Each structure stands twice: as structure tokens, then as C-alpha cells.
Amino acid sequence: MVSLGDGQAAGTISLEAGSEPQVLLIHRLCIDEGRRGYGAGSEAARLLLRAAVASGYSTVRAWAPGARGLALYFWVRMGLRPLHGEGPDGGIWLERRTGE
């Protein structure tokens, strides 16, 4: 769950350790519609990436659904690069090495 300064939930994050060592998979980072536009998603992503580094993950991967170009744009803005090939459900995986 993501929360804003008012302590109210702003959205959800779904992640898991990957099958490869030191890989963190972000399946979902979603800010509730009424709370978008205030930077909560970008701040949550920055904090999540920082926590991944502190936890020893060498690679972070995020999934963007094929029908949502904004999700792809969001993760590119956060420093992730698209991986070649189609991901789950026609989406795309993006990746960032934590040393980058």
C-alpha cells in the first residue's frame, strides 16, 4: 500500500523476489484514480528502487500492460529500460540494474 502525508491509502504495490537471484519483480504499482497527479506514484517508485538497492537486489524488473502506454512511459521515466520480446498478457518487461 502506498500512503500520502495524510495517512490515507493512495494505491497498491505488488512485487515478489524473482526466480533469478537478486532480482525484484514489480507486478503492479497503481495509484487510486482520485489520488493521481500529485507525484505519489513517482515517489513510491523512487522509494521502492532505493529499498531494492538497500536490500541487495542487483536488478529490478517492472511489467507494463500492453494496452497501457502510460505505464511503459512511467517506468522509462523511472530509469527502467524495455526488454526485448513480449511479456505476460501482451505486455512488456522493463529492467533496471541497481548500479545504474
Image (cartoon, grey):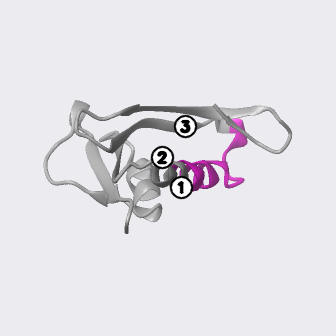
Prevailing secondary structure class for the magenta stretch in the rendered image: helix
- For label 1, the residue is 50
Return the x and y of residue 24 as percentages of the image width and height.
Answer: 37, 41
Q: Quadrant of residue 62?
A: top left
Does residue 63 appear left or right of residue 51 in this picture? left
Q: Which residues are magenta?
A: 34-48
In this view, the mark in front (3 or 2): 2
User: Of the residues shown, which amino acid type is indicated by label 1?
Assistant: Arg
**Do the residues bearing badges 1 and 2 touch, measured as CB atoms within 8 Å?**
no
Whole-angstrom CA distance, mark 3 to mark 2, is: 22 Å
Residue at x 13%, y 48% (from the top left corner): 85
How many numbered marks, from 0 up? 3
Q: Residues within 10 Å of mark 3 (few under 14, many from 20)?
A: some
Q: Label for residue 55? A: 2
Residue at x 21%, y 54% (from the top left corner): 83
In this rendering, is residue 55 above or below 89? below
In this view, the mark in front (1 or 3): 1
User: Of the residues shown, which amino acid type is indicated by label 3?
Assistant: Cys
Residue at x 83%, y 45% (from the top left corner): 5
Q: Quadrant of residue 87?
A: top left
Q: Secondary structure at mark 3?
A: strand
Look at the image and say whether residue 35 sits in the magenta stretch: yes
Whole-angstrom CA distance, mark 1 to mark 3, is: 18 Å
Q: Secondary structure at mark 1?
A: helix
Q: Earlier in the sequence, mark 1 or mark 2?
A: 1
Does residue 75 appear left or right of residue 34 in this picture? left
